[in-house]
């Protein structure tokens, strides 16, 4: 377990299971026990590992966590979604490679046609370099 004595408002919100905005509102109302502001940062003391919120005078009972959670938060990874996304990326990459290969083949065919045309012109006694029109 950690040996922290104070936390900031972001960490307190995670510990309490409420939003940071709600923690800031409670801080401004003076409802978090022992909290002090040092410059722009709130220092919230921990009592038995948790910040303590002072109950308000009206409204329903608070829904925040009052005791530390026994285990750390678990992140669930949807492997199927990640796998599908990776497959889609690989497919797009393969398609792009295929398009590049086709473009290279078409360029090579154009070069061969141009070379064959030059050969035909030379056979006909025409110098392709002298008669070329500049575009």
Image: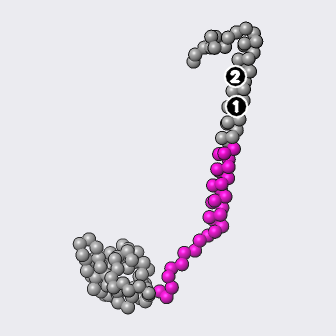
Q: Is 61 placed left or right of 85 in the picture?
A: left
Q: Residue at x 58, y 16 (%)?
A: 134
Residue 116: image x %, image y %? 74, 21
Name the disc covering residue 114, or none.
2
Residue at (63, 65) in percent of width and height: 81
Judge whether residue 27 is colored magenta: no
The answer to whether 38 is drawn above or below residue 52 in the figure is above
Characterize the local packing of mark 1: few (<14), some (14-19) or many (20 or more) Cα atoms within 10 angstroms.
few
Mark number displayed over residue 108:
1
What type of secondary structure mainly makes up the magenta span? helix
At x 70%, y 38%, the residue is 102
In the image, what residue occupies the spot 35% across and 90% down?
47
Q: Earlier in the sequence, mark 2 or mark 1?
A: 1
Residue 122, above or below 1: above
Q: Does the rendering let one see residue 128?
A: yes
Contact check, label 2 and label 1, Cβ < 8 Å:
no
Q: Quadrant of residue 46?
A: bottom left
Residue in the foreground of this view, choosing between 109 and 23: 109
Q: Position of residue 132 (x, y in %)?
A: 62, 14
Find residue 29 and report its image quarter. bottom left
* Residue 67 placement (x, y as % from top left): 43, 89
The reply, left or right, for residue 66 in relation to residue 101 is left
Range of residues picked out in magenta: 69-98
Crowd rating for badge 2 (residues with CA inside 10 Å; few <14, some 14–19, many 20+): few
């Amino acid at each position: 377990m950690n040996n922290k004595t104070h936390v900031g408002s972001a960490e307190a919100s995670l510990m309490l299971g409420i939003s940071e905005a709600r923690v800031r509102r409670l801080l401004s109302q003076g409802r978090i026990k022992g909290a002090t502001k040092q410059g722009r940062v709130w220092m919230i003391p921990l009592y038995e590992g948790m910040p303590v919120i002072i109950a308000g005078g009206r409204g329903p009972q608070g829904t925040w966590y009052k005791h530390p959670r026994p285990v750390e938060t678990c992140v669930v990874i949807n492997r199927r979604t990640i796998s599908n996304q990776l497959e889609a990326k690989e497919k797009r990459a393969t398609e792009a490679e295929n398009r590049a290969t086709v473009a290279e083949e078409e360029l090579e065919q154009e070069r061969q046609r141009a070379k064959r045309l030059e050969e035909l012109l030379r056979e006909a006694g025409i110098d392709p370099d002298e008669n070329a029109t500049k575009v």
